[in-house]
Amino acid sequence: MKRTPRNLLIIIVVLSLLISLGNYVNSSKNLDDLAYVMAIAFDVGTSGKYKISLQLSTIESSASESMSSSSSSSGGSSGGGESSGGGGSSEQQTQQYVINTMDCETLDMAINIANAFTNKDISLSHCKILVISEKLAQQGVQEIVNSLINKVELRPDCNIIIAKTPSGEFTEDSEPKLEELISKYYDVASNNETGIGYTKGVKLSDFYSNMNDYFFEPYASLGTVSNPKKNTNNNKDDLSLNTQSKSFSSNTPEPAIESMGLAVFKRDKLVGTLTGIETMCHLLITNELKYCDFNIPSPINADRTIDLYISNLKNSKIDVKIINGSPFVSSKFDVSIKVLSLNDDTLTLTEDVLNKLEDATTIYLSEQIYNYYDKTAKELNSDISGIGRFAAKNFRTIDEWEKYNWAENYKNCTFKVDVKTNIKSGHLLTSE
Amino acid sequence: MESNTKIGFSEAVCVLLIVVISHLILTVPKIILHNQGSSSALNIIYITLIALLITFILSLLYKKFKGKDILDLSGYLLGSKFQFLIGIMYIAFFLFTCSLLLRNTAENLKTMYFQSTPIPYILFFILLVVGFMNRYSLKSVIKCNLIVVPMVVLALLVLFILSFNSFTLERIFPILGYGSGNTFVNGIGNIFVFGNMVFLFFLMPILKDYYQFNKIAYTSVITSGIFVFLTIFALLLMFPLDISSNSNLPMYLQTRKITLGEFIQRVDAFFILIWIISLLSYLSIVMSFILSTFKKITNIQNKTFVSYSFVAILFGISLLYKNVIQIRQLDANLYKYISLFFTFGISFLILLLCNIKHKIREKKKI
Amino acid sequence: MNKLINSIVNAFKYTPPNKYSFDLSMNNMQNSENSISPLEDLSQSVYPSVEVNLEYIKVKFNSLINSDIKIREFDLRARNKLYKAFIVYIDGMSDSKNISRFILHPLMLKSRANTSDTDEEIVSSAIASNITVKKVKKFNLVNYINACLIPYNDVTQSKSFDKVISSVTMGNCALFIDTIDTCFICDVKGFEKRSIDSPTNETVIRGSQEAFVENLRTNTSMLRRIVNNENLIIENTTVGAVSKTGCAICYIKNITNDDLIAEVKYRINNLNIDYIISSGQLEELIKEHSKNSLPETLLTERPDTSATALLEGKVVIIVNGTPMALIVPCSFFDLLASPEDRNINSSFANFLKIIRLIAGIISVLLPGLYVAITNFHEELIPTELLFSIISSRQAVPFSVELEIILMEIAFELIHEAGIRVPSPIGSTMGIVGALVLGDAAVSASIVSPISIIIVAITGLASFAIPNYSLEFHFRILRFIFIFLGTVFGFLGIGVGIFLYLGILSNFSSFGTSYLSPYVPCYDVNDNGYFLVPMWKREKREDALNTKRSNKQANISMQWKQ
């Protein structure tokens, strides 16, 4: 009996401590008290350092119901407080999401302001994409990326996109067409690069990793909006998006997000962009191209093009030797091609035609890869393919490697490309 | 040690493994990657071989002292006062190690999930469990550990396998890291990762079969080496050196990179679950050893009351550290040398001196 | 003031724990006594005088008040002499026909046996001077009556009243005869009992369809039929000073460890209680860790399960009046096994075992994990599912943890009510209660649909646990994990899991570790949680330390060679 009152006393003390301090110290967040950010957009600020837009998802009671549309309110509150203070902020509300845009110095300040607007705690744990405008990227994104990667609740696999339009417009105009939920739309859009070949979804963790890597330079997806609502930038003629000088912009009357090409960085500053075909070359070199469609000018009839399906048979072999202080990069590619299109040239796929196609494809691919190397090395001096990791084995220690300064020596590279193309027969049902 | 506590081969190996794994999850990779750079994997293989050599020497030195732990050896060497002193030193060492690990974990948990919870609250909650577990005998704690270790090992292996996609094999170049001197000469200091070997000196009296001691020692060193190698190798290949050598929880970063399709994302929370269980098991075991040591050097009867006192002491020491930076500095600098001193310094010295004394005595008899 | 100080000091004073320790495998049997000193008073032996015996019996049995105690006085004829005698029996427990035919009839009525003047038994004779001197053995009435006059198969003699009284209360008939200080006890039990039926709680498809009944002898006979070995020992003992409930301790002498048998007998024979009614009460009384709700014995109503346990080297305890046998020792994995496992193909059994293991984990952890994830780790939930949860919770006034607790309590109420309600409407009540309550609660926005789903899945998983005690234990544990998940998320859950593993590791059942054969790491010998094919089950469990460890030859299927 003596032990029982003592044990009881201990249990009561412990429980009362836990419960009494429970409310004060409890870090739990009620699901209903959180507002979930779907996308964060960064742009150059007008009154603050950055203009940050947070796209918050509204929770509807059922998928078929819709909220009242287009009520917009603008607040002129200062938010942000002190001397470095935030600027104005505005809020737009449409069916599925609410966008809060504010000028401020840091992301945390923006979240604080948004908390005040939404009266809920902002949660970044389901953020799908990060959009940074081209203008801001040219100034440098290290601060943004560092603050984002250190946010524990932010998913490190959210996609990072460099927008040619102002990033706020990018999020405003991203309305899902084939999905109901915006989160699903972002998921599908970002992860659907398999089979496209002209773009690649880049995760925040990979971007951050490349920014701090001595083998890689960072890169990000490049996106734009065709027919933006506000139409501040005329993107239709921006040919840097287009492959082979042809426009891939959709001609729909409604705004639509396009993702085409890559944005190339040197450390944390944007130095250039890659076109679709250059992106395909990049994916070939980094062994990330599973398969995609592309077309080449027909070797038989110069006015026509032939559609081909490319898949990476084997991993590319890249070797780097240091000759007289300059790197010599030899790369070998072994790709498998299937003919897709059906026209006069491909109606009869004889061995002769196949051989011509193979040669034409080899020449075309080699040319494009050389162009890609030239652009990244000579023009942009940014080793986004990570050729440096093959060069590192020429050095014994890290000090030697750092002394060599690969980042600056990349532009002195000489490239040799060897493409082996293997065209299987056409597999067309009606070809002979 | 308690006379009715006898453990077998698997239990002993699991005790030694949990010590390595608990430190591996937290601070060890950062220290090694920071010091050795791209030659970390090579360095780990190298120090594992050295550890095996040391184990061989240990087995030779321990031949004549089957059934005796470090306290018995120190008593044999210089009497009970020396035994008391050694006991207190080891207790202080264990308390320091535990407090560092505990506070580091609590700080990390606070950063991740418990931003508004004060540190003492988290520490109190964890130590409540440790205090409860110490009401049971050492054998029960070791049996519990026998269940925990396979779970943790499986989790680490799954983590390694799921990380395959993110490996960049070329990150092992430049092969010699910061130089061959740094890898093979300065790198010997990294043998502190085998700090679990200090428990070999306490395990002897509680083994069912003393002749399994050598087998236990070799198995634990090899398995520890394998785990350390796999972890360091994975981190080296997944992240650039700047990130892996500067982040406080590189393994946590590793778990954040794992996605399996679109449904299974952010499995780091399950990793936290496994980590907490392994930490609790480690703390319970070390606390049990502290209590057994204290009981041996002071011959007390009431072990339970003393266990609460030691838990309170551990709580106090864990709160002494000012901030996270201090903890990380102590971890990176002080812990390494203290661990080396106790595991490979004083323990071996005592063992060697005991062997010499034994030989002299034998000669005198003759 | 002193009293207060004393009480505080006493509350915190160290008292060495009174720890009972029994470890089977270390042969560390500290308690070797298995019998207690006899309680009977010597003066309570049977008197030679029938009147005194009669009075004694009348007083002891309160025959003036007790309506079913029957005393029949009569005159017994033996060797053509009449002796006064009486029988005592309990109406309703004894078979009157057998009493009349085999006891009263041959003793009362004249017959050749009781009228013949038997020859004196001559021990030796000597002839001297034409005088024959014969030494004769004195006539023994007790032997004569036992051997010649009572033509009944089960007759024992007793000189002590205690044995006589307990026999009569069990349904036997006691015969007292004048001038003899011995009482004859005839086993004429004839009370009504339930016939052997199929098991209600442990139904199987392929196994035997017999279950234990309340009668001890019937149960032991079922065991005998299955085991079919002369080394099966069924020791009878009584528990309870007042109820004298019969208990049978069954074991196979040349398989079971002697220390285990001694320990079981020691615990049962050292219970200082007035009565026990069921095996459940006995289970609690012989439990070592009495404060813990984990079961230390396996309860079964199937004779085939009990026989398997006996053949594996365990001890089975059957209590009179309960159709449930206790099997000791038991491990945690035994509690998760179903009686069907050994009747079907091992791969099917292993599949079901995996399902049960998952069910066990879900039953304990699912609500706690749900609360922890929604409160601390909502990033784990896929975005679409999260929005679906939030949108369904829009109008719900309660927090997640309160919802779960309310639904769990409601579920327990429905469960309990379903047992009490008479069976024709019992199952309907359960379905109606679950559907209507659940649906109505969602429509009224008291709870969200996801909580209903979580609680329903947890309930289903708990019903998949074959052992009733373990299922109950998990139901209690669930609430603890909900609390831990609420307070500290995954840290709390991790702490709970570790503590539970620690408690399980410390637990033991009659000297064997609760998590054997995995913890401590014995040689599993194909006796682990998952079953190996029948032809591979060669050895008995190491933890039981049996006398006969091999149960199959290396190559058991000799026909294949």
Image: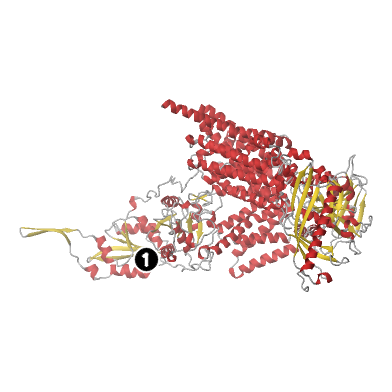
Q: Secondary structure at mark 1?
A: loop
Q: Nearer the viewer, residue A25 or A152?
A: A152
Disc 1 residue type (three-letter): Val
Quick check: can you spot residue A365? yes
Name the residue located 5 percent from the left edge and 58 percent from the top edge.
C129
Q: What is the chain letter for disc 1?
A: C
Q: Where is C408 relative to A427, above or below?
A: above
Quadrant of the rendering where the C terminus of chain C is positioned: bottom left
Residue A123 rendering spot, x and y as whole percentages: 79, 51
Quick check: can you spot residue B130? no
Quadrant of the rendering where the N terminus of chain C is positioned: top right
Colouring mode (rainbow / by chain / secondary structure / one colour): secondary structure
Q: Residue furthest left?
A: C129
Horizontal side, residue A270 vs residue C333: left or right: right
Q: Which residue has dot 1 on it?
A: C188
Answer with the quarter of the image where residue C164 lies. bottom left
Residue C488 rendering spot, x and y as whole percentages: 69, 47
Residue C338 rendering spot, x and y as whole percentages: 54, 61
Q: Nearer the viewer, residue C459 or B340?
A: B340
Residue B351 rendering spot, x and y as whole percentages: 53, 32
Answer with the quarter of the image where residue C472 lies. bottom right
Q: Where is B66 relative to A421, above or below?
A: above
Q: Where is A99 relative to B104, above or below?
A: below
Horizontal side, residue C163 vs residue C424: left or right: left
* Label 1 packing within 10 angstroms: few (<14), some (14-19), many (20+): many
Q: Residue furthest top?
A: B364
Question: How many callouts does the rendering have?
Answer: 1
